[in-house]
Image (cartoon, rainbow, N blue to C red):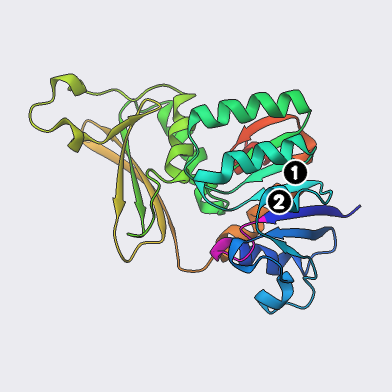
Amino acid sequence: MTIKVCLAGATGWAGSALARHIAHTEDIELVTAVSRTHAGRILGNVLGEPRLICPIFATAEEALAYPCDVFFEYTKPDVAQANVLAALERGAHVVIGTSGLTDDDYAVLASVAETRGRGVLAAGNFALTAVLLQKFAQMAARLIPQWEIIDYAADGKRDAPSGTARELAARLAQVRPSELTVPLEETQGVVETRGARLGGSQVHSLRLPGYTISAEIVFGMTDQRLSIRHDSGNSAAPYVDGALLAIRKVGSFVGLRRGLDAVLDLT
């Protein structure tokens, strides 16, 4: 059975790479796309892929007037939650690739997904190395009580921390909060330089030219240190396989799951 997909952000950096790969799959079909800058056109004409014959709409609300099985959210954090809620109201399962949503946002989406009997799979990063970073970090946090997260991205990225870092902090919060030898309130000097406390982890966000998306977690113990790091390059290729997997898996459960490994067998 073919999975019918509405892709929001279909002409963006990551969305266009995903759309081109969907054109070559047999079990997934793009039926509508969302892009404000290319509304009214055919997606294949914009991306140079004749297999993509779906129309482009300016808003998710317009695109969702046409039935789909899965809504893929790849836009911006200021519209992502509204898009997802609209998709759930229309009866679609949802995959979220947009970063910047907060834990409170996800709590709302989880409640609506349960009520509607639909699945929502949110992944801050669909790359396999990012998935493994999160899994290995959870394993390490069970044994090492002190760590800090460093989030790297290009200078033009507006949301901070990134979805990858937010997701990592949320995962570690399920294990325990990190321990601080010196409590934040006892910090002498400028306390903000210690980073933001997010889900029980200290998170530091760097925004500089030369980076795309990277995430690092550093664990420390007496006379020893463990660093786990994910780096992505300039192409969106690392995210495609994980995104396709998410589309295929999101209809297999009800409610919200965060992280691609939530639908993988990594035990």
* Quadrant in the picture for residue 28: bottom right
Identity of the residue furthest to the left in this view: 189
Residue 61 rendering spot, x and y as whole percentages: 71, 47
Q: Can residue 162 be seen in this view?
A: yes
Q: Is mark 1 on a helix, strand or loop?
A: helix
Rendering coords of residue 48 (x, y %): 68, 79
193 lies left or right of 202 = left
The residue that mark 2 highlights is 245
What residue is shown at x 78% (from left), y 39% (from top)?
90
Q: Which residue is drawn at 73% across and 74% down?
A: 44
Amino acid carrying label 1: it is: Lys
Depth order, front residue of 8/145:
8
Between 214 and 254, the one lying in front of the other is: 254
Picture residue at 72% right of the left edge, 41% below the top = 87
Q: Does the magenta stretch include residue 9?
A: yes
Disc 1 residue crowd, few under 14, some 14–19, many 20+, Cα 10 Å = some
* Disc number for residue 249: 1
CB atoms of marks 1 and 2 within 8 Å: yes
3D distance between C-alphas at marks 1 and 2: 6 Å
- Whether residue 135 sits left or right of residue 221 in the image: it is right
Residue 144's disc is none
Say if 56 sits above or below 221 in the image: below
Q: Residue type at mark 2: give it.
A: Leu
Q: Where is residue 128 in the image (x, y as percent from the top left)?
A: 56, 52
One can see residue 132 in this view: no
Region of the chain picked out in magenta, as a range = 8-14
Q: In the rendered view, does 80 fall on the left or right side of 168?
A: right
Q: How crowded is mark 2: few (under 14 residues within 10 Å), some or many (20 or more)?
A: some
